[in-house]
Structures are given as structure tokens and as C-alpha cells.
Amino acid sequence: MVDWEERQKEYWDFIAKRREKDYFSDFGPPHYSLMLPPVVKDNYGKWKYHEVVKCGVLKHVSESGDVVYSIRAVTPRLLSIQTIRDFCDIADKYCDGYIRWTTRNNVEFLVTDESKIDPLINDLKAMKPAYPVGGTHDAVTGKYALSNIVHTQGWVHCHTPAIDASGIVKAVMDELFEYFEEMKLPALCRISLACCANMCGAVHASDIAIVGIHRAPPLIDDDGVRRMCELPSTVASCPNAAIKMKPKEKTVEVDSEKCMFCGNCYTMCPGMPMFDPENDGTAIMVAGKISAARSDPALSKVVVPWIPNEPPRWPKVVDAVKKILEAWASDAKKHERIAEWVERIGWEKFFEKTGLEFTQHLINDYNRTPYIYAQLRASTNFRW
């Protein structure tokens, strides 16, 4: 068990030493090195190799010969205090109190005793609800599992959402869960969701992305604008200059022809709400990636321009995502990401294999560039 009183003393000693040398702020979290397990701290930056023991279990071997295992489990998108306490109880039982969350919202338990791995996994599965282990890949054999889906807050908390976030992710993950628990995909696949076009969920560079779409300009509550908003800041917040002041009325108006429904005005002025669950909806994007391992990074492209909100299970969104994933999984080569698969087969074949409908909304028609011909040849319009 961790002696947290000793850890707290170590933290304040660390701060005192920093203050002796230079300025150190009390703001922000404690230094990350104080939270590292001893085996990680002792071998920091000295890892010899990593390997996948089984789906969800990673083995890390240091140059000194020390070994640590990380067990990666899925977590709910909305965490209660009780759930965190349950995770901490398991960490106290098997990991000397050490636990971490990954950038894709998985929880990882770090153990040095291999015999504790299976009991820890069994305890996770015995929890109510259960928390299965998975989401890893083995680059050597080319077997991959679906990563945990990252998403923004959506209707629960965000101030500019067009869709729910947790509900859609739960519905999609329920349908694709077999790909999280088993390594049977040809390459890494990351699915992300952003509840509006501000794209906080990194959907612009994900293999499959779900994006909330507003289809109408903000509603202007004149009384709310007068009470809560500074007019010059509100006008300046619009990237398209679609907002104009009405000085006599002490409010604003929106040019619907210029508005791109980003919701940035609502951030500055609560008197201009964007919420419209009946007319808002979802777009699906594919073929984005950050990795430059085998090909250049790529931005996601729209393949389904709009799907209406259909809570609580969003069947059309789930069906579209599943079609894309399974078409890629059955046709891609080893280690071939969705972006690389699309580049190889072309967009015509992509729509043919996925069964998605092609519409004029998907044509790349931006013509203010010397590279227009190259763009059209590589777009969903046609390919030579």
C-alpha cells in the first residue's frame, strides 16, 4: 500500500527545492513524477521493448530487466465518484494504489506480478457493470483491436452541441464491442466523436469520425442579449462576420447567408442559443490519421453529410459506422489504415463496398487554388 502521507511530504519537499532555484507556481496539478509507480520511476526513459501479452494486456521490459504489465480496461463516458472509488479499490488490491487514465479514456492498472493479471481482470468483469479489458494491438503479427471511442460532452455539458455524445458512443460501442475485446482488425482503427463542428474530439484526424451538425443560425433572445452580452465582443466572435449590431435596440442580428453554424457566438453571448435537437444531426467522416508510419497524415473526409438525431440508440449512425468498419476490415491489407485503404481502392469503390449513398454534398468543388485539378482527380467526384 502507498503511504500517502509520505507522498504528500515528498511533494512539498519537491516544491520547496524548486522554489529555492526559481519561481514555482502553486497552481496546477502536482508534478507527474510524484505519481509514478516505483518501477516506472526507476526505469523512466530506459525501456528496452514492449509487447502485447493478450488483448488489453501490455508487457514493458526495461534495460535493467524490470518488468511491468499494464492492463487496459474500458470506462464509461460519464464517470461517477463511486465508479472511480471502485477502480481505486482494485488498484489498492493489485497495484499498490497506482492507476492511470489514457488519452483515449481507458483506465490502466500497472502491476509487476504476472500472477495478479488474471485475478485483476476477473474482478473488473465481476463489477456491476462489468469493465472488460481490450483495445490493444500487436504490430508484429498485424492483429489489432478497436480503440476506445473518444468523445466530447454533448448534451450533458457542452454549450454548443448538436448531438448527444455518450448516448451515440454507447450505441456504437455496443454494436462493435467484439472488435474491442479481440485483436482481429487488419490495422489500427480510432473512432472519435465531436458534438459540433468545433471538433474538440480530434475527429478531423480519426479513422472514423462522428460530428454533430447544426443546420440553422442561432436564435436571438433580445432580452438575454441586453442583459448578458457585450455587443462588440459578440460581433467580433463570428469568424464569418455574420453578426451585426442593432444599436438602437441594443441587440444583434444574424445574416443567415453568412452563418456557418459554428456556435462561437454563443460562447461569447448566452443570449444566442444554438440548441435545436429536432433539426440538428450527425455527419460521418472517414480516412483521417495522425500517424506517418507508412503514409503521410491525412484529414478526415465527409462521407455521410447528415443523419437526424434518433435517441436513444441512433440506429442510422450505428449502421453507417458498422458498414464502414466491416467493409474496411474485410478488404484491407495487413497494417492498412482506412485512409490508406481508401487511397488504394479509390472513393468510387469505397462507396460501392460500404453501400453508402453518394450525394453532391460530397464533391470537392473548391476552385480557388492552382491545385484544383489534382484535388478533383483525388476527390469523391471522380478518380483517374
Image: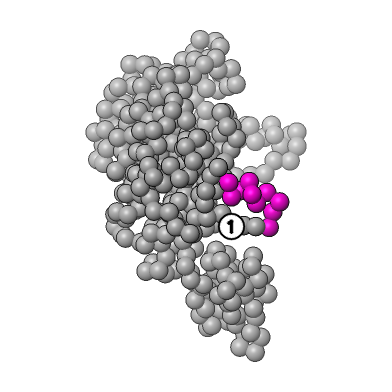
**313 horizontally vs 238: left or right:** left
Q: Is residue 373 magenta?
A: yes
Identify whether 355 is placed above or below 13: below
Q: Residue 286: percent from the left, percent from the top?
A: 47, 45
Magenta span of residues: 368-377
Q: Toward the viewer: 346 or 281? A: 346
Location of the C terminus (image quadrant): top right
Taking the image as drawn, is residue 115 in sight?
Answer: yes
- At x 52%, y 78%, the residue is 220
The residue at which mark 1 appears reads as: 365
The single residue placed furthest to the top in the displayed view is 65
SS for callout 1: loop
Q: Toward the viewer: 360 or 184? A: 360
- At x 42%, y 59%, the residue is 306
**53 horizontally vs 22: left or right:** left
- At x 30%, y 35%, the residue is 178
Q: Residue 91: percent from the left, percent from the top?
A: 38, 30
